[in-house]
Image (cartoon, rainbow, N blue to C red):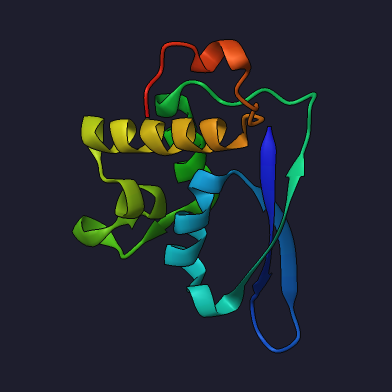
């Protein structure tokens, strides 16, 4: 799985470094603001599997990043970014799939791939 290293500045004296999936970047931005984020390098961990269940991933993100607002106006940062209910799960799943596909190694076309193709 690929992770993006992000440094988040909390205040003048404190910052933290985190490794997150690409679909978490918009959530971090919603929570901390892009001016407090410094996106770094992409790192690969071959022994970690890509998450495949968007519903479970949404639950994890809700627990991890918490909510904004209070009472009836409270909404999780993940739902603020991706939406709530089945639409939010679907949008998160699409973002997870896009990140996985973007991380796939690009292969050069073979000659046989080009046979019969007109351009």
Closest to the observer, 100 or 108: 108
- Location of residue 4 in the rendering, given as x and y in whole percent from the top left corner: 67, 51
- Location of residue 63 in the rendering, given as x and y in whole percent from the top left corner: 50, 43
**Farthest residue toward the bottom?**
12
Residue drawn at the location 25% of the way across and 41% of the way down: 84
Q: Quadrant of the C terminus?
A: top left
- Location of residue 58 in the rendering, given as x and y in whole percent from the top left corner: 43, 36
Closest to the observer, 79 or 102: 102
- Location of residue 41 in the rendering, given as x and y in whole percent from the top left corner: 73, 57
Tally of marks: 0
Relative to 14, 119 lies left or right? left
Residue drawn at the location 40% of the way across and 18% of the way down: 117
Q: Quadrant of the N terminus?
A: top right
Relative to 45, 27 lies left or right? left
**Farthest residue toward the left?**
72
Question: Where 28 sits versus 105, above or below?
Answer: below
Closest to the observer, 104 or 65: 104
Residue drawn at the location 48% of the way across and 73% of the way down: 33
Quarter of the image where one finds residue 111: top right
Question: Where 37 sits versus 5, above or below?
Answer: below
Question: Where 57 sits versus 11, above or below?
Answer: above
């Amino acid at each position: 799985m690929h992770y993006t290293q992000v440094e988040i500045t909390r205040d003048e004296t404190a910052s933290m470094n985190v490794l997150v999936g690409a679909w978490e970047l918009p959530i971090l931005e919603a929570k901390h603001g892009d001016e407090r984020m410094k996106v770094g390098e992409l790192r690969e961990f071959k022994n970690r599997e890509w998450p495949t269940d968007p519903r479970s991933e949404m639950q994890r993100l809700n627990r991890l990043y918490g909510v904004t607002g209070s009472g009836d106006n409270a909404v999780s940062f993940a739902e603020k970014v991706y939406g709530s209910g089945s639409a939010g799960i679907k949008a998160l799943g699409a973002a997870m799939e896009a990140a996985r596909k973007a991380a796939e190694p690009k292969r050069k076309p073979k000659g046989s791939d080009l046979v019969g193709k007109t351009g």
